[in-house]
Image (tube, rainbow, N blue to C red):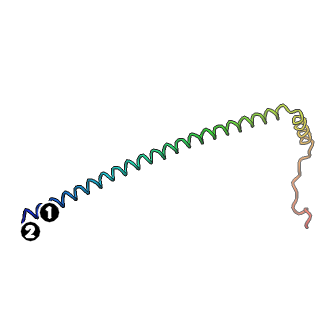
Amino acid sequence: MTHSAKNEVKVGQQRRMNNMARVAAENMVAQNVSDMERQSRVDGLVSEQNTRLASEISGRNAERERMEREIQRVCDTSEELKVSDEHDAVVEGNREPERPRDPRHTPQP
């Protein structure tokens, strides 16, 4: 094989290698774009889900607070509970203070 024929073969091989490298680079860029688009969709879904969860939690907290206020209002306005609380206070005031027990005088089983 002549020198010019060898050079032509080398040039052809180099062109093929350059073409393969270009195709590989294009594929890599396309894959990166695809990955970024997918990640962007996932991020959007996560953000949307977080917004919905925050709204749901906020609603539940507001409902819980409303129920607590309603319970407190009922307790504050209930005559039966006022009478019961007054009775408990009288009973507590009439109770004798407990004396400390001597462990030596406790009945043994």
Percent x, y of residue 61: 67, 39
**Distance (Cα) linking label 2 and label 1:** 10 Å
Q: Is residue 34 left or right of residue 93?
A: left
Percent x, y of residue 19: 23, 55
> Any mark on residue 9, and which?
1
Q: In this orientation, which residue lies closer to the viewer: 48 or 103?
A: 48
The residue drawn where x is 15% and y is 59% is: 11
Percent x, y of residue 53: 60, 42
How many marks are shown on the rendered structure? 2
The residue drawn where x is 75% and y is 36% is: 67
The residue drawn where x is 28% and y is 54% is: 23
Q: Is residue 44 left or right of residue 26?
A: right
Q: Secondary structure at mark 1?
A: helix
Q: What type is the residue that disc 2 sits on? A: Met
The quarter holding residue 90 reads top right
Q: In this orientation, which residue lies closer to the viewer: 88 or 106?
A: 88
Percent x, y of residue 31: 37, 52
Q: What type is the residue that disc 1 sits on? A: Val
Q: Secondary structure at mark 2?
A: loop
Return the residue at label 2: 1
Residues at discs 2 and 1 in contact (Cβ within 8 Å): yes
Task: Name the quadrant of the C terminus.
Answer: bottom right
The residue drawn where x is 42% and y is 46% is: 37
